[in-house]
Image (cartoon, helix red, strand yellow):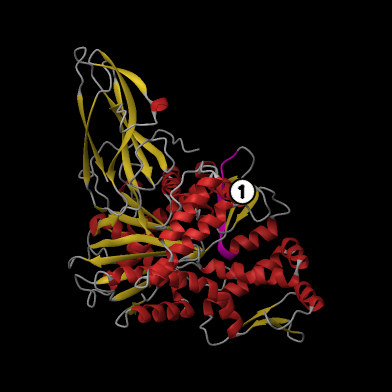
Amino acid sequence: LLQQPKRAYSKMSNAEEPYRVCASIDFGSGSIGYCWAYISGDSKTYHMPRWTGQNQDFNRQKVPLPLLVRQKRGTEISVVALGVEAHERYLRERKQDRNLFLFDNVKMKLYREHEDYFSILGLGRNASDEDINRAYSLLARKYDPEKYSDTKEEAEKKFKTIFNAYEMLSDSKTRKAYTDSIDEAPLHTLRIKSVDGRECFALEVVAKCLEYMKDLVVKSVREDIGGFSTRKIRWIVTIPAIWRESAKQFMCCAAKQAGLEERIGQLNLALEPEAGALSVIDERKRILSPGTRYLVVDAGAGTIDITSQQILNLNGDVKELFKVTGNANGSNKITNIFLEMLEDVLGSDFKYWSRTYMDEFFDLKHQFNRGKDRFDGKYGISLRLSKRFFDIVNSVKPSSERFTYNVEDRELTLSRDQMMTIYEPVIKGICGLVEDQLKCLGQLGGCEYVMMVGGFSQSKPLRDAVLAKSKSIDNSTELLHPANASTSILRGAVLFGLRPEMVQSRIAGYSYAIRYVYDFDPTKDAGREEQAYFLTSKGQRKKSINRLSMFVKAGDRVPYGKTQKLTSYSADDYQKKACISIYKCINQDIQYDDEDGAQFIGKLVLHIKLLEKSSLQQHTSILWL
């Protein structure tokens, strides 16, 4: 699926065929939208649609997902509808048209949240029970909170992380379940389930959705200025900053398959918290001056991305201060907690009802999402129940601890306190990340602002909790919230596309290395005789071994456009090409390509013109980071 058809890239340079429009597409977990602006002239005029629809209670600049597609056997997928219209058409036509697939929360299928428990204990994947027990014993003594009176809180957090890792790996059953979960199939072969359990390839679904949005952008541009070549549009697709490289590569491939890269360099990816911050800086230039340090909380429907940055100059250029963090505590998790609570209270009857009467289930879920959006932390919400669902509730007669129901009005009511109970685990998970980042910023002199962007940041209980947590650490910290937080990422992505160098540097989350061939050293390479092999070099047969050489280390600051010059030599006399293999490493101590934690991610191939025999040739490669 990842093998793309050969593309006829334009041979013209960017100078001969300049971009005239920059367009961004935000494929979110809860909604999707686009925005575009002219590159020359008044680039601050953002063009965004106003989504409306029959029987829909929204008039927004982003349309809510789910996504309804049609796929006949042996044919390509086509997008049928988005949002509430997707629900309505699916329920109306599904019995007559079995080629319809309704997908909800597609994007979160690409997010894999795994904590590397083996690395926490300093072990490889093949560690024995004895190795796990020994490593835990050593680390538990080292980070015993009682030994750290000055930094007891940090030691307790480290100790808890070590204990959680040991608890997962010490039991053979939980260890197997964990290793199986991190050995999932590659994302390009990922199949996602529709609401009725049928499957499609995720890459095709995402690509067709992006193509659908691309066609809407092109139509909007052409309505504004007439005939227009799509090669003159620079495309920006937003992605969560906490996504792994495999998920980012997946989205890049889907965008290319959607036709967003007709010429080299036409497509770029923007990290969502960075895009949101650029939008806020552009909007609040009067109060955000060079040197300002701030925290960005990008709260969406699926993931939470948190990063810390500093403004460098009057142009609004920024640099990242610490590695980005995040989790899956988006607003969709609140809905999931509510539904899990209903299933826990009502049992199998609720599960049967939700699968059998999808129209009633979708309506209940839609009502809760509307109530959740309006919930301000002062008053509760009420949901109108269908007769079938009310009969289930009335037959169980649950206690009023979780929710109450009214027989006369056929309503389910969640009080203010009951709603806050649902919100509590989500808010707690977000505030914990905010606290960690603010403490790091405290080492640099503190944080002046906390910027909240993304649709979920419009939740008053969340904003209040984040502000309270920020004030408890630094009382001078203020909260910045854009006028339209749900579209701030779209606008910021356009700004990023106009000038990508605005983000002048980032912090490397991993170490990266090149694999080289070295002469075998009995001292350095002790215990690795089996991995050694022989090469003929300068007419001599030499014992050799592969080692890794780090060119970027985790935590390093990587400036925008930095180049890394690598010098190497032919490994043998008759070498016709050099393969520069690049590895991602979870720590800086990895020396060999077959060690746990070293992951091959790609290679550069240099074709070599053979000169005279027995003369090793020097090669220079330049990596653009």
At a point 78% along the width and 67% down the height, the residue shown is 349
Residue 405 in the image: state x and y as whole percent. Answer: 72, 83
Q: Residues within 10 Å of mark 1 (few under 14, many from 20)?
A: few
Q: Is residue 33 above or below residue 484?
A: above
Q: SS for tag 1?
A: helix
Residue 47 in the image: state x and y as whole percent. Answer: 36, 64
Q: What type is the residue that disc 1 sits on?
A: Ser
Residue wearing tag 1: 172
Q: Quadrant of residue 369?
A: bottom right
Q: Quadrant of residue 183?
A: top right
Q: Which residues are magenta?
A: 75-84
Q: Is residue 475 above or below residue 595?
A: below
Please indicate whether residue 225 sits to the left or right of residue 347 in the image.
left
Q: Is residue 81 magenta?
A: yes
* Residue 46 appears in the rendering: no
At a point 45% along the width and 79% down the height, the residue shown is 465
Residue 370 in the image: state x and y as whole percent. Answer: 57, 75
Front one among 112 and 377:
112
